[in-house]
């Protein structure tokens, strides 16, 4: 079994689709980050394990889910319908096989699924990450897999939108083998809190830029 951490903030619209496509040998952990639309209650009714993280922030929700996980390998993915849970085994497979320590899903967007400003910001961050570390990553994808105890040992501190980048930076500094696999990126359900708006993208870039500095 593999636990899947799903950070959630008002994703009631997407939850049934996402949870309905979780592979049989993966266990969803919904990390509810203060939803006001009943996401936590809905997730429980749909059979997911729910943990509540009152501190606001994407990283805070992810960390709460990581602490709650119990399996050796843990996956993370957005719960907005932009990623297909049926592709989790593609991302986890290199970790399960011992071929990689951290695997990221490189997003292959469907038409209209990824706003131009968000895609450009992601590309620039990936290029800057490559310049500083030599890592040949093309995406800081939100679908990823790693071993739980090793992740906890990284002592990630960011609790905002810098969490995904800090994970990569600390993993690289610790000598981890980091790889990418291609996953589909779909048009999300509802309104994005981050990449769907220029303001949200700017906030994420600011958090990640602070880490790079």
Image: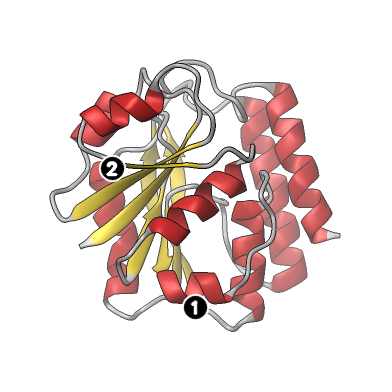
| Residue 52 location (% of width, % of height) | 47, 40
Residue plotted at (53% across, 45% down): 61
Secondary structure under the numbered disc 2 in the rendered image: helix
- Say how the picture is coloured: secondary structure
Tag in front: 1 or 2:
2
| Residue 65 location (% of width, % of height) | 44, 52
| Disc 1 from disc 2: Cα separation | 23 Å
Tell me if residue 104 can be seen. Answer: no
Label located before the other in sequence (1 or 2)? 2
Residue plotted at (75% across, 41% down): 205
Quarter that holds the N terminus: bottom left
Tell me if residue 121 can be seen. Answer: yes
Residue plotted at (59% across, 23% down): 196
> Is 164 situated above or below 161?
below
Secondary structure under the numbered disc 1 in the rendered image: loop
| Residue 174 location (% of width, % of height) | 61, 82
User: In the figure, is residue 132 to the left or right of 154?
Assistant: right
Mark 2 = which residue? 85
Mark 1 = which residue? 177
User: In the figure, is residue 177 to the left or right of 173?
Assistant: left
Circles 1 and 2, Cβ within 8 Å, touching? The answer is no
Quarter that holds the C terminus: bottom right
Q: Decide which of 113, 24 is in the foreground and name it.
A: 24
> Is 18 situated above or below 58?
above
Pick out the residue farthest to the bottom: 175
| Displayed quadrant of residue 157 | bottom right
């Amino acid at each position: 079994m593999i636990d899947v951490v799903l950070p959630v903030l008002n994703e009631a619209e997407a939850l049934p689709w996402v949870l309905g496509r979780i592979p049989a040998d993966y266990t969803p952990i919904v990390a509810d980050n203060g939803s006001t639309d009943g996401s936590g209650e809905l997730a429980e009714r749909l059979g997911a394990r729910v943990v509540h993280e009152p501190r606001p922030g994407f990283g805070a929700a992810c960390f709460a889910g990581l602490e709650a996980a119990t399996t050796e390998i843990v996956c993370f993915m957005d719960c907005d319908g932009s990623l297909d849970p049926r592709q989790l085994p593609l991302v986890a497979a290199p970790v399960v096989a011992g071929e990689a320590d951290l695997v990221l899903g490189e997003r292959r967007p469907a038409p209209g699924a990824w706003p131009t400003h968000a895609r450009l910001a992601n590309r620039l961050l990936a290029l800057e990450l490559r310049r500083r570390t030599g890592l040949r990553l093309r995406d800081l994808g939100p679908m990823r897999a790693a071993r739980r105890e090793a992740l906890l040992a990284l002592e990630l501190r960011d609790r905002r939108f810098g969490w995904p980048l800090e994970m990569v930076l600390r993993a690289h500094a610790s000598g981890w083998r980091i790889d990418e696999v291609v996953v589909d990126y779909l048009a999300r359900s509802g309104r994005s809190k981050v990449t769907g708006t220029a303001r949200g993208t700017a906030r994420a870039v600011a958090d990640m830029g602070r880490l790079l500095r």
